[in-house]
Image (cartoon, rainbow, N blue to C red):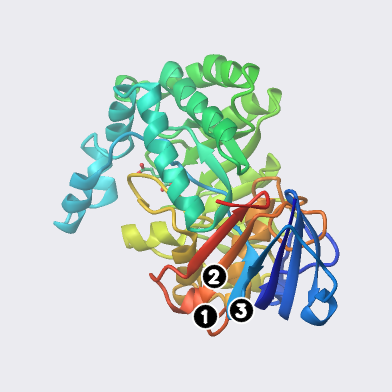
Amino acid sequence: MTLLIKNIKELLQVRDTNVTIVKGEDMKVLPILKNAYLLIEHDTIVEFGPMEECLNIEADKTIDATGKVVLPTWCDSHTHIVYAGDRTQEFVDRINGLSYEDIANRGGGILNSAEQLQNTSEDELYNQASKRLTEVIKLGTGAIEIKSGYGLTVEAELKMLRVIKRLKHDFPIPVKPTLLAAHAIPKAYKDNKKAFIDIVVNELIPKAAEAHLAEYIDVFCEKGYFDLEDTQRILEAAKAHRLIPKIHVNQFNAFGGVALGVEYDALSVDHLEELNPEDISALQGSNTMPVALPSCSYFLSIPYTPGRAIIDAGLPLALATDYNPGSTPSGNMNFVVSSACIKMKLTPEEAINAATINGAYAMGLSNRYGSICRGKKANIIITKAIPGYYHLPYAFGNNLIETVIINGDVF
Ligand SMILES: N=CN[C@@H](CCC(=O)O)C(=O)O
Ligand SMILES: [Zn+2]
């Protein structure tokens, strides 16, 4: 089966060599072909080039993309889409003056989601999450990471991970599972955090790893949640089970979580709304991807990750949604790309690099996803007819995505 997309107004992120990460100044460069074609065989990109070179190509199916922009699907490297219900009441409470911290301190927040999740069946959780996953694929997401973390008991965490495994099996896009082993201190362990971490280290991590339910380990390294010592204990236990760190750090406070992540060779450190020069230095020379989550900043009215400073220091940057019921009830990567430009002052080229190839890197997928490259998977976005790719971030809130192709098939 061959699919030819022809008369493409702008074909974005075309790479002749298999680039797997872009950093610093290189993030400003988004290679583009105008008036181009793209040829897909089965699930793979096999050729692309200017329309003049397309004359003799025949395909089983042809899509005419006149006036449209074509690009690789978004790679969303940080989500919590397996959750039960919602937190709309807390949303209204925040409008009326309570802070995220106030809500957590009175037993709401993550503990609220954990209670709802513990009382929801595995099938119901799957149904809710699969609706969200279908929606975000239609919005252009073609690879995703999903975390546990709303279980807060061994049993409920494993239930979440089994739901993620089922999504991975049933959906055509790559789904990367993360054990967010320490997301909040459960009510029952309020005065005995150490006992909870003992369970994480001695039971949860071994069980999740032995059942091959997770590739990554995550911890909410934050004041009032898990400190550096707790995080280190968990990362050490996870290392013994070959779980790679992707951790929540510096959302509200900067106190060394980035350097700790780098020390444990984290694939990514995520949030970074509060970042100091030591954090930037720690990232320099490492293999760790800094990940910004601007929809979370928008929803909680907290600072945006200083993406400009990160890139200007020569570092790479990835963008992701953080889709979750508490801080970011949105999985729309198009909004993320717009916000990165509008609020973080990334150029459209930097934002698109951050949301495609660097997002793929932050899931260990950038050798097969995240760019238009011969031999890579054919996960492709075709926009509506638009004046040019600047419209993707510019026309924020509009849905400019017309067609999403996953593994060579229209989704
Ligand atoms: N900050 C920690 N975890 C999630 C939010 C959790 C919640 O409020 O449910 C986040 O990444 O923003
Ligand atoms: Zn998160």
Badge 3 density bin: few <14, some 14–19, many ≥20, Cα 10 Å? some
Residue 396 percent coordinates (x, y): 41, 73
Residue at the spot of label 1: 386
Real-space Cα distance between discs 3 and 2?
A: 10 Å
Compared with 251, 34 (above or below) is below
Q: Quadrant of residue 165?
A: top right
Q: Nearer the viewer, residue 398 or 181?
A: 398
x 32%, y 46%: residue: 326
Query: Left or right: where does residue 147 sit relative to residue 60?
Result: left
First along the sequence among labels 3 and 2? 3
Q: Which mark is residue 186?
A: none
Numbered label attached to residue 66: 3
Q: Position of residue 98 (x, y in %)?
A: 19, 52
Type of the residue with mark 1: Ile
Task: Tell me the residue at 34%/44% (across/down).
Answer: 325
In the rendered view, does 23 fall on the left or right side of 334?
right
* Residue 244, image quadrant: top right
Relative to 359, 193 lies left or right = left
Percent of width and height locating residue 54: 81, 74
Residue at left offset 70%, top offset 45%: 364
User: The residue tagged with tag 3: helix, strand or loop?
Assistant: loop
Question: Alpha carbon of mark 1 to alpha carbon of mark 2: how far?
Answer: 7 Å
Q: Is residue 76 visible?
A: no
* Label 1 secondary element: loop
Q: Secondary structure at mark 2?
A: strand
Identity, as a three-letter code, of the amino acid under mark 3: Thr
Expressed as whole percent of the image width and height from the top left, the position of residue 63 reads: 64, 67
Residue behind mark 2? 383
Residue 53 appears left or right of 387: right
